[in-house]
Image (cartoon, rainbow, N blue to C red):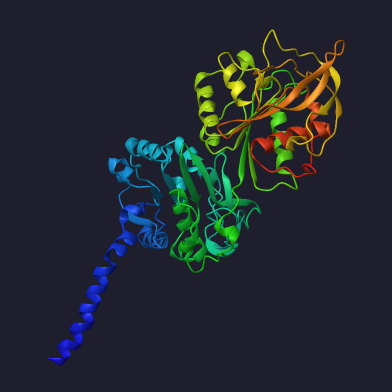
Amino acid sequence: MKPSKIILTPFLILIGLLIISKPTMLKANDAENKKKVLIVTGIDYPGHKWKLTAPVLNKAIRQDPRLLVTVTEKPSFLASPDLFDYDVIVLHFMDWETPDPGPKARENLRKFVADGKGLVLVHFACGAFQDWPEFRTLAGRSWDPKLRGHDPHGQFRVNILRPDHPITRGLESFETIDELYTCLAGDRPIELLATAKSKVDGKDYPMAFVHKYGRGRVFHCPLGHDVRAFAAPNVQALFRRGAAWSAGLPPDVTSYQPGDYIQITKQTQSPARSRKIVLIAGPASHSKVAHDWPGGARLLKQCLDSAKNVKGIRTEVVLNGWPKDVSVLVDADAIVLLSDGLKTHPWAKPQRLKKIRQLAKKGVGLAFIHYAVAPPKGAEEDFLEWIGGYWELGYSKNPITTVEVSPASKKHPICRGWKKFTARDEFYYQIRFRKNDKRLVPIVTALLPQDRPKQEILAWAVERKDGGRGFGFTGGHFHANWQIEPFRKMVLHAIFWTAKVEIPKEGIKSKIKEK
């Protein structure tokens, strides 16, 4: 009897503890509180042993306690409506000499990501859906059989480029033994997180990158040839964090695993987010002397990127007045437009104008340069709200003249670090402003016209109720004027200000290569 009594007492105590702890335990393990990740595998190139690598990938991802991982060995599941029960799809297959899962699977996957869910691509998954053109856009980069496939299997160094990004935060560059892919092609704007230098041609190639597709997030990493490659702690960290980021989860230092080389600091726990600036250029309408919108956008990007004393920005240039993939605008903090106006305004098309209206309501900053301040028909009230004013046909003036231009405010950040200058330009004046608009702050003024001079506003700024900022500048007709340092600096300051980037007291310091 004594042995039974000795065993029974601790058992009853344990049962009691479990009963007391049950609600807490259920809450911590509640599957509904986790993001659901589906690893899709089952077929591949014969040299890839997916039956061995998929379990390693599964184990690596589910070490984040916020992720509930399921594996299917049937890519055809992508065609099922049940696909939408998940939050992230991890593609770990390649349809080598095998038909892909078909049109329904393609449409499901496209809609899955476009509607706001996550996608992770692993190694040769860059070659899945070979005959589907949209896959290259969805994946950001895809396998091009016309390119050299990869370096000989062996050791190489993966260089971390973005230690501030949630996926790569705190990760050190590392050595791995894998296939260094050189076969990815595409021109979709992506955010590089890591690269590796080929020992064959000496060029750097993407090893990890992210981008947005519609409202969804995509993480793409061509590492992971075999079990040995997946065994590298930092490779596991990339896929684990990539899955969490794709699911929309914030960085969580509690989910970092041994071997991640994470340095937990205040900056790690609450990093400053980089600001994204998209410069949209309409088609050049005059010549390279004037209205060279593509040339102007590229020059401004180069100056923004080279600003030595401003950190935490990303810039992208879009040509022809509108992006092929509108998702490039979804996470923009500011959109800068250099283009013609009125009937030829690139946003005269209703769907484009509708999209900008949606973005503006979300607080995206807007800056219009020169003729872009002349709205298409029906957008006049939008322009008054977005940037505070516009050029009105039959009311505003636009002579080509040489004038002395002066900063109009001593306190506004846009006016920091530059002084008055003289320029020959087609400065628009007599702008149509909203009456008694308390938001409006003059930024640049000049005495116009020359025969009856009075102070006219040539550039202005507003802060909107939706949280966004707006800026208009009527100069910029002649491309050569970007060489005028205060002219250029004022516009660069305005772009940074519109994106809510802090402008140094002395003004930004950037380089210009073009002469």
Q: Is residue 343 left or right of residue 308?
A: left
Residue lying at 72% horizontally and 12% vertically, measured from the top left: 396
Q: Residue at x 53, y 54 (%)?
A: 166
- Seen as rendered, the residue at the extreme left is 1
Which percent across, then down, holds residue 332? 57, 37
Residue 340 visible in the snapshot: no
In this rendering, the answer to whether 355 lies above or below 98 is: above
In x, y percent, where is residue 219?
A: 49, 49
Point out residue 485 in the picture as x, y percentages from the top left corner. Answer: 83, 34
Q: Based on the displayed image, in which of its 4 quarters is residue 375 positioned?
A: top right
Q: In this rendering, is residue 95 above or below 457?
A: below
Figure quadrant of the C terminus:
top right
Residue situated in front as seen by the camera: 188 or 493: 493
Q: Nearer the viewer, residue 93 or 191?
A: 191
Residue farthest top in this picture: 394
Q: Residue furthest bottom?
A: 2
Return the x and y of residue 337 as percentages of the image width and height.
64, 27
464 and 212: which one is in front? 464
- Considering the image in quadrants, where does the N terminus appear? bottom left
Q: Quadrant of residue 393?
A: top right
Side of 191 where 394 appears, left or right = right
Asked whether 190 or 474 is in front, the reply is 474
Image vertical order of residue 118 relative to residue 30, above or below: above
Residue 226 at least partly seen: yes
Quarter of the rendering containing residue 130: top left
